[in-house]
Amino acid sequence: MNNKKNILLVILLLTMVSLAAISVEEGQLLLTKIDQQSNFEGTNLSALMTMIAEDPDTGIEKTKVLQYRSDDDDKFLLLIQEPAVKKGQGYLLIEDNLWFYDPESRKFSHTSLKDQFNNSDANNSDFNASSLAKDYVVRTISEGTLGSYAVYVIEVEATNNEVTYPTQKLWVTRQGNLILKSEDYSAGGRLMRTSYYPSYAKAGEKVIPTKMIFVDELIKGKKTTITLGDISVKPISATVFTKAYVERVNK
Amino acid sequence: MRKNLLVFILCLLILTPILAVDEEALFGSSFDDDLFGGDDFLVEDISETEIDLEQLMLTDEAGITLGGSYSFSITPGWSWNLDNETDTGTLATDLSAKLFFDARPSADIRVFGKAVISYPFDEVENKRTFSDILSIKELFSDFSIHDRLFLRVGKQTLNWGVGYFFSPADLLNLSEIDPSDPDKELEGPLSVKMNMPLGIDNLYGYVIVPEDAKDITDAAVAVKYEKVIGKSELGFGAYYRNGQAPAAMVTLSSGIGDVSVFGEGMLSYGSDKKYLKNDYSTYYENPDDRFYFSATAGANFTWNDKESDRSVTFAAQYYYNGEGTNLNTVILMPFQNNGYHYGATSVSFMLTKKVSVGLFWYGNMEDLSGLVKPSITWKPVDAVSMTLGLNGTYGDIGDEFTMVGRMLGVSLGFTLGEANF
């Protein structure tokens, strides 16, 4: 009789586990949901970003950047507004091409989404539309908490070598599918960066992090904090995403 | 009952690692708790900004922005002629300021000007003209026609070729790239530039007014079409001016992994280059009844060590100068274009944020003469840097880089108080 009870108890616990757990396949669907709610399809996004880069060697540098995104067309434009010496430097992404514009030489040069943005801890890819479901597969997924939030902890691995980080560990809220934190690893499995997304803004079903903190895990004390203000979801003129516009706004 | 309890505890012990990852290890840091431990609203509704972000950088609250840069350097040095066994001391000074204004009376138009003032300021004693001391580098206005056709009118640097050390396709700018200072700003002509974006591609038209133009027939015209294919960009252009050799060019810029690659080809019917003959009194010109083809290809990349301040920047380029020269003549202008085959390479290693080393090579691959410049730079503070450099030429006497013999120089340059404003 006791044996039967024990077996029932084990079955009950295993059932609880299976009910509570989320499968890898469901994790992959979760990535799709994150992409869908992070991408401003059918509309555009523009914002004024304030970037504070802290470096133990060089001190604190403040940069103001105008961000324009047209996710439907795979386009973005980042324009440095401050400091004055960098005003007009721009990053223009159109489909697979990312150009950097240097107002001094008046030349556009091809650059990579993997590169650091303005020597900060942010990468150019941090400002692109989200494509987690396309670029990564879920390896493991489990439940946990982050502070006071119930989250899924997802380990993902890149499906291509176009991504900035080959593996990532994501902390995603179970309600709302918001990425709160990610650990970004090199191909060798070394933790390169930890990213935090403590606040979001919402327009309809779409969300965008309004604060991002990128902590350099290799150089102690080095981090970059980005806050988004003056957000607009109004349509952006197609002329903004042209070399002509970038040339016009520069010094 | 005890047995049941034991089984239950055992199951929990076994299953705990499956149920959840070690929370302390994952989320236990104070930073995590600081950020995510409170009851603050994580998501807020977007309140649409009242600022017109599209117009923000096209306008200026003050109406005009002034800025520029200041540089001062002094470089004592010593050089030896290894073939003639002579030596001489040198002292190079550079004092200059770049000033610009950027006036934006409305979002539809802006006027921009940039001038450079450089030392020495005495015209007579130093045989400098007023325009050497104060030179207008750019003066133009930007406007558009219905946001479809974008015009830049005035004296302006034109973005035409893609080469780094050499750019045979750059048919428009007045100055050529100096391979030993490839980032130096080029001087452009007085021109009307028209740009029509065609989706991701661009169409450009140019009307160039040369300084020596007497009437409208002296104006030059050029067109360029930039076509993006995948991750590559192709450019096709043509240039025509009455009395000069008409030319067409093609450019390519692309990437292979993290390496940027680029190439140019230029075809002209006739040549406008003049060469001084050995008697130094008469000129030799290339025949005009044939085609000349020049081409270049190169690559560059930057590697940053994410675990330190170290980085490597590398650039290399080959240049086939189809206009070349007659081997019996001494080239007059431009001096750099003597010969048919050239190469240039630069590599710099950033060892720390304050110390970097570099190596530059520029050579004529035909007469096997060239220039090699290793250097080390120390930047103890932002406004001060010191560069110790060697400067050596190799080749036979009479070769392009060793006309008067092989030279070996050493210099110690101080850059002080450099600033942008």
Image (cartoon, helix red, strand yellow):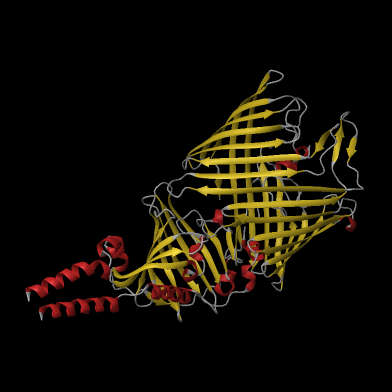
Relative to A15, B279 lies left or right: right
* x then y, percent, for residue A101: 61, 57
* x then y, percent, for residue B139: 71, 55
* x then y, percent, for residue B154: 75, 58
Q: Residue at x 16, y 69 (%)?
A: B10
Q: Residue furthest left?
A: B2
Question: In the depicted view, which residue is nearer to us: A213 or B7?
Answer: B7
* x then y, percent, for residue B98: 63, 47
Quarter of the picture holding the N terminus of chain A: bottom left
Relative to B167, A214 lies left or right: left
Quarter of the picture holding the C terminus of chain A: bottom right
The answer to whether residue B385 is seen in the rendering is yes
Question: In the depicted view, which residue is nearer to us: A109 or B205?
Answer: A109
Relative to A119, B299 lies left or right: right
Q: Residue at x 89, y 36 (%)?
A: B283
Q: Residue furthest right?
A: B289
The answer to whether residue B167 is seen in the rendering is no
